[in-house]
Image (cartoon, rainbow, N blue to C red):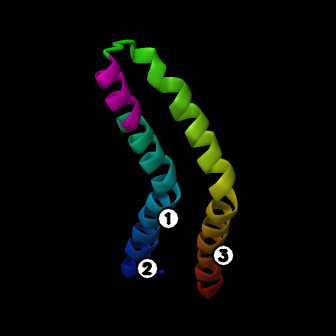
Amino acid sequence: MTELDVVNLIREAFIVTLKISSPILITALVVGLVVGIIQTTTSIQEPTIAFVPKLVAIFAVIIVFSAWMVRVMMDYTREIFFMIEKI
């Protein structure tokens, strides 16, 4: 395994991590923003109100995207095993 292979492997690991975490992070960002806007317009200044909608939305996203997330992780793992096979 050359240095180029290791660099590509690490780069792919970062890309896979971003792919898997992006739906969850984007959902948390959007729900937090919407709840923040609602809290601002209604003058409710309770910081714990945002947690429940975020948790529900994140669990829904995990349920919806779990098959895709597992598929992405399995593809990356297969790629690693094929690289090990080449050595």
Q: Position of residue 38 (x, y in %)?
A: 37, 28
Of all residues, the one furthest to the front in this rendering is 42
Give the residue at x 35% y 37%: 33
Q: Residues within 10 Å of mark 3 (few under 14, many from 20)?
A: few
Q: Earlier in the sequence, mark 3 or mark 1?
A: 1
Q: Nearer the viewer, mark 2 or mark 1?
A: 1
Name which residue lies at 39% across and 69% down. Answer: 11
Give the residue type at disc 1. Answer: Val
The amino acid on which the numbered mark 3 sits, given as a three-letter code, is Arg
| Residue 46 image point, x, y percent | 39, 12
Label number found at residue 78: 3
**In this picture, is 13 found above or below 85?**
above
Query: What residue is disc 2 on?
Result: 5
C-alpha span from label 2 to label 3: 15 Å
Tag 2: amino acid: Asp
C-alpha gap between disc 2 and disc 1: 16 Å
Tell me if residue 86 is in the magenta stretch. Answer: no
Range of magenta residues = 34-42
**Which tag, 2 or 1, sits closer to the chain's start?**
2
Q: Which residue is mark 1?
A: 16
Element under label 1?
helix
Q: Main secondary structure of the magenta part?
A: helix
- Percent x, y for residue 65? 63, 58
Which sits earlier in the primary sequence, circle 2 or circle 3?
Answer: 2
Image position of 36 with respect to 75: above or below:
above
Residue 41 falls inside the magenta stretch: yes
Foreground residue among 83 and 33 = 33
Please, what secondary structure does the residue beneath circle 3 have? Answer: helix
Q: Nearer the viewer, residue 49 or 78?
A: 49
**Residue drawn at 67 percent across, 62 percent down:** 70
